[in-house]
Structure formats: structure tokens, C-alpha cells
Image (tube, grey):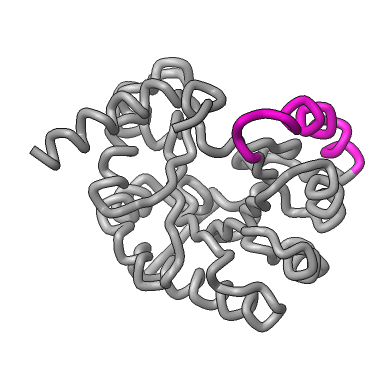
Amino acid sequence: GGARAGGGADLLDVGGEPPRPGAEPVDAETQMARIGPVLDGLADGPAPVSVDTRDADVMDAALTRGAAVINDVSALTHDPRAPAVVARRGCPVVLMHMQGEPRTMQDDPRYACAPLDVFDALAERIAACEAAGIHRERVVVDPGIGFGKTVAHNTALLARVGVLHGLGCPVLLGVSRKSLIPKLSNGEPADRRLPGSLAAALAGVREGVQILRVHDVAETRQALAIARAVAGA
């Protein structure tokens, strides 16, 4: 119950540093200039806000401006001060798996077994967070679809993302509009990837994923409603 934002979103994700393949880093001051007004505008909204950043200064400033969750594509490895900020502020944090860093992550990603390698890497990051004073119950894990992974790696992760439940943390999955979809289909541009995004989201939910990071919120909610009704019939 209650009002929902953004077509039914339970959490709004805001970021000032697009972590696309080949992207250059964006400094903390520029990130805050981009997201600060957005955070202010969402401060009294019906949904909490997560901030997508790798930088400790942005994390600290964003939490002060009303953000509730930190979402770090580097799993708190990019900025050595980041774990201490998250521990001190006591907020939930999303640890995403990425092989390499945005500028080079798609150069030549390699895994022995992508689902198990991602599991092991995230287990190490959870242990590091606990050592830094971040309690496991505040950690969410994300397999990082498209971040240092080929199409084969991504599809293997989607098929077996349920193994991440063994980490004892909620699992977040972000596949919406990603390049995996046109690579498996017919090269569709980002604004024509809704069907593939929904298919990937439903695949994740069948594997028990608890959180979906999507662009098309209302459409995803409709698909989930039908899938859940059928599953419960």
C-alpha cells in the first residue's frame, strides 16, 4: 500500500558517473553538481533514493542530502575510504561485481565459470565489508550483468543467478536495456529493448532475485503481476 514513485518504484537510483564500457571517471564535484538538485527534488518523495557512485566524498555528501542507499559498481574497491564512510553512516550498500574498471572492462573478460567466479568475488567483498564494520544484513549483491563480461558470461549468470543466494544477502539484478539484449536479438537501440528487458527480469525473478533495477517500472510491474498470478494459480 501507499503511494509509489516513478510508476511504482520502491527505490529510485540516481547517479552522476555513467559506468558504461570505455567511460572516463567523473570527479566527485561534478557528480554532486549533477545529482545534488535531483536529491533535493526527491527529498520529500514517496520512495527512498539510492546513489550510484564509486567515490567516498559523493557517498558522504549524498547521504547528507537525503540518500538512503549506496550503490557501488566497484563493490567499495575504487575508493579506499568508501568502506569507512558506509560503515560510519550505517546505510545499506549494493556491492556489484565488475571485472576490471569501466574504461577497460570489456577488453577481454575471462572466467573459468562466470557464476561461480562472481560468487567467490562477491564473497570476498562481503568479508572485506564485514571487516570494515559493515554488517552483512546491510549488504545487497549484484552480479553486474554487462560489467566485464561477454554475452556468454552474461547469459550463464542470468541462468544461474540463484547461486548468489548462498551469500546470505538479497540479490539485485540490472539487465534493463543493456547491450546483451540486442546482441541476442536484432541490434535494437536502447528505446526498443523493453521486451528483452522484461524477459530478463522474469528470468531473474524465477531464480529468486529480490530487487530489479529497471527503466520501465510500470511495464515491469505488470509483467511481474501476471507471472506471480500464474505461479500462484
Residue drawn at x 60%, y 35% as measured from the top left: 47
Closer to us: 151 or 5: 5
Percent coordinates x, y for residue 198 in the rendering? 32, 30
Q: In this view, does 4 lie above or below 160?
A: above
Is 95 positioned to the left or the right of 216 in the image?
A: right
Give the image location of residue 114, x and y in percent.
37, 63
Where residue 142 appears, as percent x and y from the top left, is 48, 55
Give whichever of 187, 197 is nearer the camera: 197
Residue beneath the point at 73% across and 30% down: 44
Residue 72 sits inside the magenta stretch: no
- Where are the magenta residues, as a range? 29-48
Residue at far bottom of view? 131
The C terminus sits in image quarter: top left
Residue closest to the eye, 32 or 150: 32
Q: Which quadrant holds the N terminus?
A: top left
**Residue 65 falls in which quadrant of the image?**
top right
Quarter of the image where one finds residue 32:
top right
Which residue is located at x 36 percent, y 54 percent? 153
Principal SS element in the magenta part? helix
Asked if residue 39 is among those painted magenta in the image, a careful observer would answer yes
Left or right: 177, with 16 as reference point: left
